[in-house]
Image: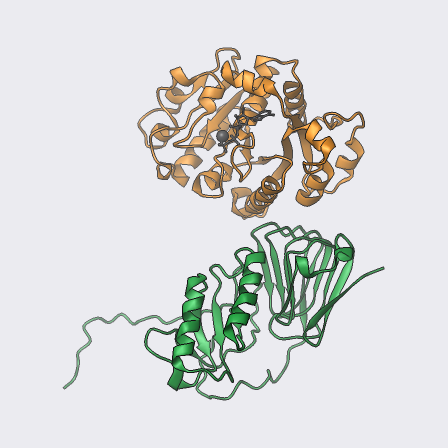
Chain colours: A orange, B green
Amino acid sequence: MGKVIVVTSGKGGVGKTTSSAALGAALAHKGDRVVIVDFDVGLRNLDLVMGAERRVVYDLVNVIQGEAKLSQALIRDKRLETLFLLPASQTRDKDALTPSGVETVITELKRVFDWVICDSPAGIERGATLAMRHADIAVVVTNPEVSSVRDSDRIIGLLDAKTVKAEQGERIEKHLLLTRYDSNRAERGDMLKVDDVLEILSIPLIGIIPESMDVLRASNIGAPVTLADARSAPAMAYFDAARRLAGEVLPITIPGEKRGIFGKIFGRKAA
Amino acid sequence: MTKVLTDARSIRIKGRSFLAVVLSPDLPFDDWLARLDDLAARSAGFFLGRPVVLDVTDLPIDRAQLKELLGEFSQRNVSIMGIEGARPSILGQGMPPALKGGRPVSDEAVAKEPVIELQNSSADSKPAAIESRQPLQSIIIREPVRSGQSVIFPEGDVTVIGSVASGAEIIAGGSVHIYGTLRGRAMAGSIGNASARIFCRKMEAELLAIDGVYKMAEDMAPSLRGKPVQLWLEGDTIMAETLI
Ligand SMILES: Nc1ncnc2c1ncn2[C@@H]1O[C@H](COP(=O)(O)OP(=O)(O)OP(=O)(O)O)[C@@H](O)[C@H]1O
Ligand SMILES: [Mg+2]
């Protein structure tokens, strides 16, 4: 049975879709079977980031409404055999996603794939709560600034209340992915410090992704950054984060700093 | 003549409890409203969607003045669910209903939603301070209180082992103890208890209240920020000091 990961944030534009694609490709790169599901109905863009926009025939809503089989809607990545995309509908409205439909699709995907990655829309409304509903693991994407951190805190509260796991009295595994970290701005002090973000959110960190032009370049050629340029700084940070997701213990370094913050992170009690 | 009931189904009447915020304006209203605006501006959304009761006991105002005051509230999107302590002569059409006999709560549940009892009592007298006063209770929360969450416990003390996020709130009938950073709002003695206190390991609060007396972040001495702090009430003033 595969694991379901929700990539979520509350705030928009912090890097959920970028991270879903990059982590998905990194996991598939080591041979795991991965599907990335776009839950952003009406505003899909995972297909663009993955370079599959011209191959979308059916989408998640078609599957839920019985207009297409799951196998017809899945798009296999051109570069990685084991990487798939389940696109969102660009035309339907959000109410087309039903809780029971989502449950059926996720259950079926879990049977076939090692990882089911749900790219959540921004906000705390229906789309976001449906994306997190069946998750085993949450990747909370946060930028080092106050409003993003506060929204992430809100999302963590929802993860502990509104997921199937939470309702069954279990704990959903939560990880913090700090993205768009700008070491120049950090030096000048006009960004929240990594320590402060960790103190506020008190969930374990799985990676710090630097702000980088490589991300933009990758999305312009329609490839997850981990496939576009595997040696770039953001790609390497995503590869490490993917290994941590899979259970490996690796030290984390803050971009621009030599000192590892390994001890601190693992000494911290997860909430 | 007898009226025949054709529908045998009975009407269900249920009770519901809410914790209402009570506002007791004083004269002149302009000054009081300015202070209210100040509070509202600095505690974003505090009054939004919250049941508010207007207490006008002992205010020498007439119907026109009350009407004007209600207009001021609706302009501010504060919806008044009822008016307490008003002489019948100043109430008029289109005003919120008169409320009587509101009283402190002793609801069992730790509600995620605001709770107060609006009890139906025919007597005009204020209910005698709860006769068989129950021993103060306490609850302990072992995880961070996240933005958007509220913990409401009118029965007694609330202890949080963890932080209270910006945008989260703790409302306790007794004292509030935060073994972590207090970034959100904390209200102690919320149903009338001037001896309640607020303690936290690290003070970054947005709003503090004891027994209805408020203090905002900006009102606090900068030297308290980030420190372990306790707050208590002396008369109508919230006092604060660092804990070693
Ligand atoms: N590490 C990074 N460095 C530079 N730019 C980045 C980085 N991560 C994301 N971006 C850019 O930020 C923008 C938003 O990213 P993305 O679409 O992944 O966010 P999102 O959280 O999915 O947004 P939405 O809430 O709209 O779904 C994109 O233009 C993306 O290229
Ligand atoms: Mg997105």
Which one is nearer the viewer's eye here, A180 or A237?
A180
Q: Quadrant of the C terminus of chain A?
A: top right
Residue A160, relative to residue A115: is it above or below? below
The quadrant in which the N terminus of chain A is found is top right
B10 or B172: nearer the viewer: B172
Q: Quadrant of residue A208?
A: top right
Residue B189 shown left or right of residue A269 in the figure:
left
Tell me where residue A191 sits by quadrant: top right
Q: Find the residue positioned furthest to the top.
A: A79
Look at the picture and state if B226 lies above or below B199: above
Check the image and report above or below for B188 versus A271. Answer: below
Left or right side of B174 for A159 = left
Whole-percent x, y for residue A11 in the image: 53, 38
Residue A176 drawn at (x, y percent): 64, 35
Q: Position of residue B241 (x, y in %)?
A: 79, 63
Residue A200 showing in the rendered view: yes
Q: Indicate whether A83 appears above or below B106.
A: above
Q: Position of residue A230 (x, y in %)?
A: 63, 14
Given residues A235 and B12, the one toward you in this image is A235
- Can I make out residue A168 in this image? no
Identify which residue is drawn at 63% across, 23% down.
A238
